[in-house]
């Protein structure tokens, strides 16, 4: 568990009487799932292996700043837009996994203290992060992959209309991927969100299921994880058959 989680779970009960799970309870619940992840041979959330040999760290011009922005055309805050243009605040940041369920990813994010909307796609679930200032997206990637040992995730961030994609595993950043390689192995809605051609409302209208971490408690998050372990009722990786 990260220091962030230790601080968040310093006591088992908040002033209003709501019980919070201890680190020991959370680690016990995750133990079986982590064993399954570590036993997998499919490379978890890495983009397509055939294309990864061509990966290099590249900047990608996502869209024309004069035409990009909120696809709905509403609710654009000038200060936020300015911070996004100069790169102090990411325009959008996503954590892309091979998990088969956005609900499961939301449960992991909840236990890692990450605020996000998690979306189901056939290629794997991904999280749209709400923490966008400075290096907050990188902190989220570190925390998620530290809390769930063996879970890898690609952090894709749009800063000042430049896309960066980096693989994270066990709390550490790894190799970087060019946007074309990343988009070749993800749902089209991932690219649309990252370049500003879509937003969460449009994603939901298109029929994708979205799970909000704010709607979960620690207990409900652990119940979701229990349902998705192989000892429960479902598998965990996209394309992995249930036993």
Image (cartoon, rainbow, N blue to C red):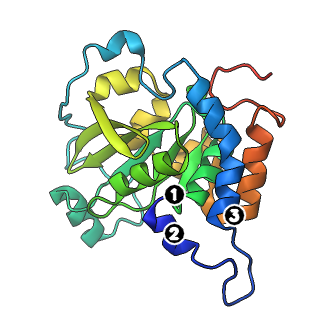
- Count of marks overlaid on the render: 3
**N-terminal of the two: label 3 or label 2?**
2
Q: Where is residue 54 in the image (x, y as percent from the top left)?
A: 25, 14
Residue 170 to residue 24: above or below: above
Quadrant of the rendered image containing residue 110: bottom right
Q: Residue 218 carries which label?
A: 3
Q: Which quadrant of the figure contains the C terminus?
A: top right
Badge 3 element: helix
Badge 2 element: helix
- The residue at the point 55 percent across, 45 percent down is 148
Q: Where is residue 173 in the image (x, y as percent from the top left)?
A: 32, 41
- The residue at the point 76 percent across, 59 percent down is 220
Callout 3 environment at 10 Å: few (<14), some (14 to 19), or many (20+)? some
Q: Residue 1 carries which label?
A: 1
Whether residues under marks 2 and 1 lie with C-beta atoms below 8 angstroms apart, the answer is: yes
**N-terminal of the two: label 1 or label 3?**
1
Which residue position is annotated with label 2? Answer: 6
Between 51 and 32, the residue placed more toward the observer is: 32
């Amino acid at each position: 568990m990260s220091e962030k989680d230790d601080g968040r779970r310093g006591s088992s009960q908040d002033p209003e009487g709501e019980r919070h799970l201890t680190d020991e309870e959370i680690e016990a619940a995750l133990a079986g799932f982590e064993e399954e992840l570590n036993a997998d041979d499919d490379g978890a959330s890495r983009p397509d292996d055939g294309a990864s040999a061509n990966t290099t760290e590249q900047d990608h011009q996502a869209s024309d700043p004069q035409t990009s922005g909120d696809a709905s055309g509403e609710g654009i805050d000038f200060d936020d837009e300015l911070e996004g243009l100069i790169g102090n605040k990411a325009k959008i940041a996503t954590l892309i996994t091979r998990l088969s369920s956005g609900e499961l990813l939301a449960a992991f994010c909840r236990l890692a203290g990450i605020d996000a909307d998690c979306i189901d796609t056939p290629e794997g679930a991904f999280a749209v992060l709400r923490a966008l200032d400075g290096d907050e997206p990188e902190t989220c990637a570190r925390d998620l992959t530290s809390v769930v040992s063996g879970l890898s995730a690609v952090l894709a961030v749009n800063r000042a209309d430049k896309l960066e994609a980096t693989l994270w595993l066990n709390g550490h950043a790894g190799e970087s991927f060019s946007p074309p390689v990343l988009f070749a192995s993800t749902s089209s809605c991932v690219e649309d969100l990252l370049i500003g051609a879509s937003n969460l409302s449009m994603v939901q209208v298109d029929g994708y299921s979205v799970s909000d971490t704010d709607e979960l408690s620690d207990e409900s998050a652990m119940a979701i994880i229990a349902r998705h372990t192989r000892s429960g009722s479902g598998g965990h990786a996209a394309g992995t058959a249930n036993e």
